[in-house]
Image (cartoon, grey):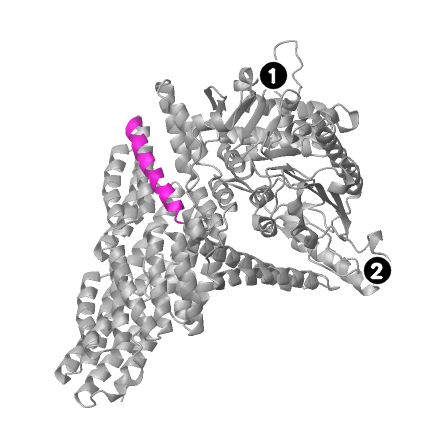
Amino acid sequence: MFDRTQWFLAGMSIALSLQLSQPVAAAVPVGKVLQTAQTNSSDAGDKAFKEGLQLYQQGTAQAKRSAIVKWEEALKLYRQAGDNRGQALSLLGLGRVYSDFGENQKALEYYSQSLPLFRALGDRRGEATTLNNIGNVYAEVGEKQKALEYFSQSLLLRRATGHRGGEAATLNNIGSVYSDLGEKQKALEYYSQSLPLLRAVGDRGGEATTLNNIGLVYSALGEQQKALEYYSQSLPLKRAVGDRGGEATTLNNIGSVYSALGEKQKALEYYSQSLPLKRATGDRGGEALTLTSIGNVYADLGEKQKALEYYSQSLPLFRAVGDLRGEAATLNNISNVYAELGEKQKALEYYSQSLPLSRATGDRAGEAITLFHIAYVKRDQNNLTEALNDIESSIKIIENLRTKIASPELRTSYFATVQNRYEFYIDLLMQLHKTNPKSGYDTKALEASERSRARSLLELLQESNANIREGIDPYLLQQEKSLQQQLDALEKQRIETISTPNPNATKIDEIDKQRLALLQQYQQIQAQIRSASPRYAALTQPQPLTLPEIQKQILDENTILLQYSLGKDRSYLWVVTSTGLTSYELPKRGDIETAAKDFLEAITSPIQRDIPQQVAQASGNLGQVILQPAAAQLGNKRLLIVPDGVLHYTPFQALTIAKPRGENNNVPLIVEHEIITLPSASSLAILRQNYGDRKPPSQNLAILADPVFSPNDERIKGKITQTTTEKLEANNLGLNQSLRASNRQWPPERLAFTRQEAQTISSLFPSASSRQIFDFDASRTTATDGNLVNYQIIHFATHGLANSQNPELSGILMSMIDDKGNLVNGFLRLTDIFNLKLAANLVVLSACQSGMGQNVKGEGMVGLTRGFMYAGAQRVAVSLWSVDDEGTAVLMQKFYQKMQQQKLAPAAALRAAQIEMMQQEKWKSPYYWAAFTLQGEWK
């Protein structure tokens, strides 16, 4: 007899598309039980059921409607035969088709008939499937908590019956609900449980769905390239299994990534592929989504009326299928268009329809967006007080959502996506300050600025003193250790691959992709450890400082805080002293960026840097824009500078500001001020809390310098064969090809002056309390062996590598060859630095671009500095550009002489060294002395 269940399994395991994410409406895997079913009256039902299933498998809307007719016929025949199992399956199939068509109430009616039949039969798998699909319907109509209740019932049954494929489907669906609720980290955890199960059971369609959904999470968190990688894995699988609806969804999502990346025409190409597939499969909710997406692109391109046409097609479809979340988003988008067309009141009317729908569906992110847009319109109507209430409600939601993300990397990327809300909030407060200068709005604006920056760094520093791995499942810790080992092994494999005489570029690219994938897995495991850690849960979220706390905890009478916030229309500077606050409005971000880039070009360009007039003009121009308004307050005080945007790349010590007539206008800021840069004022408070009262290590100085990079290095002669020499030459060639994006010359040249630098510095310390580590010993192994915890000052004199795209691949180059002439992994990457245990008062990175990294909105420079601060450094001296080898050696020698012989604090010593250098003809250009800056503790 025809095995209905097996056919059902084959036809119904294709995932249901739901908006951008995809829940899995799994099949009923009852196995061979049906072979014992009635054979007479049920045969006609089986025939009709099979025909309906074959029609459903075709995937078109017309075929699905024909499937409804066949399954209704089968249902009638099964009822006549008293075949409860056949009835249950037919009802389940009918519910599935109506769910596909967005007729959710009808789907629920069929599922609610199917469920008691499966229970009466004792068919726990069929019961689990029906519960899963009921959960999908509730998720689609916005009843997320109800959906979770059904999914949790389904999951228990699927685990109890050992149905791994069904378990994977329900885990995926739970992840989708948490994603919709804004709990992206929790969503990723469920997807990461689902994906290996789907792969283990060979469910390629389900695998494609979960890959799609992971991509959706990364896209929502601002990680568009990561999202694209997952979509690119999902799409061919969808096509291979014939899931046209799922293919359409992933095409739509790829379009959304390209739209977010600003490639609007490419986005439209993908949407135009998605739309006919959605229509062909009868997925009205998916069709509505793609229409809205196309409308968004036209809105971005300025074609407002065309955008409205697409929204007007989309909105009734969302309403017809009961998709409140999609309806809310479309209403919000219509509002945006009317707001930009100047029809503010009409915009508010649509926002007022959108907002309650977002709240009803638990879409906290959507609610926050709509509140932000309402605030924007009200500000334009000069209703500033109401606008303030709305934006504060929006930011409150954002603050709540970001705490639900355990991964620091994902918190950072998410926070970058919402920085426009903080920028608007700050600007609104400062506009209120203009009209009510005595109401404290400038104080609130400063505090909002502090809340908007370096939050992930604060949390990392808060965590660094807690043993968050205590009480963690050993399996998780073993996974973390295994991934560390895999990363190390892959680095070695990479070196071996690029060390062949003719390196295989394709294989190198594959290894680089594997390395990024492993780093991502490593970050996910660390996020799981944080989520599961009792110690981490017990940590209170570090709160950014208020103005009185900044004045009391950070400043003294000789220290001033300069905090910048760059905005689209206006920028701001707050000057904070121990007793007062003054605020200044500065030009828009674009003007400051132009002046800052001109200044950096004048200092670092080989053509301009030795022409004093050009350097002076560029320095004066930027100083006039960002410092001159506050010049009268600066005096000769110490300056703590919290930069924003392009100012993270700016050497403030080389800036000049106009003086009264008759005085020299070309005096760099460093001459009159000690200068320290900070990611935020609050970060210094956490550093002091963590490290301020600890007992200093017993040893003074560890200095790692002059590593061995090249086979042509004279220190290798006699230690290396011709074959190994060829490999090393190829190694350097491979590095040159694979790391071209770092803008560094490869192979890395020996930094001859670093040895002299190290020897001179070491001579200033007692030999018993200092350690010089040169040549082959200046290795990654030495840096990570745990002994550096014993030193107060740790100095690296070597090459640095800043990766602005993937900061986790930034690092420091140590010796790449051991004392026997063998290749070794000489790359001390950022993940290694985070895992160091230090107690250093000072870490000096006497390396090129060691202060660089990825400049992330709201977080600042993500690179080596935060790694060393997490590892235990109170302050870090870093460089902002590729520095001259000899000039750096001279600067470092003077820096340490000032600390050791004149007993100056590091910040004061660096200032004195830079002033002394600029007074020498050979080194007077800021290129030689201004690259290094001190970050962290100034005392």
Tell me which segment is drawn in magenta. Answer: 383-404
Instruction: State the image quarter where residue 370 is shown.
Output: top left
Is 658 above or below relative to 902?
above
- First of labels 2, 1 by sequence position: 1
Chief secondary structure of the magenta portion: helix
Q: Looking at the rendered structure, which numbered label has been put on residue 768? A: none
Residue drawn at (41%, 41%), measured in percent from left and top?
Answer: 418
Please state which amino acid type lies under the numbered disc 2: Lys
Instruction: State the image quarter where residue 894 is shown.
Output: top right
Residue at the extreme left = 80
Which residue is denoted by mark 2 in the rendering?
A: 719
Instruction: Tell me if residue 395 is in the magenta stretch.
Output: yes
Instruction: State the image quarter where residue 122 is shown.
Output: bottom left
Dot 2: element: loop
Characterize the local packing of mark 2: few (<14), some (14-19) or many (20 or more) Cα atoms within 10 angstroms.
few
Q: Position of residue 129 (x, y in %)?
A: 28, 71
Foreground residue among 689 and 354 = 689
Please state which amino acid type lies under the numbered disc 1: Ala
Q: Is residue 799 visible?
A: yes
Q: Is residue 879 visible?
A: no
Instruction: Tell me if residue 619 is in the magenta stretch.
Output: no
Which residue is denoted by mark 1 in the rendering?
A: 658
Foreground residue among 249 and 218 = 218
172 left or right, relative to 924? left
Residue drawn at (26%, 54%), measured in percent from left and top?
Answer: 142
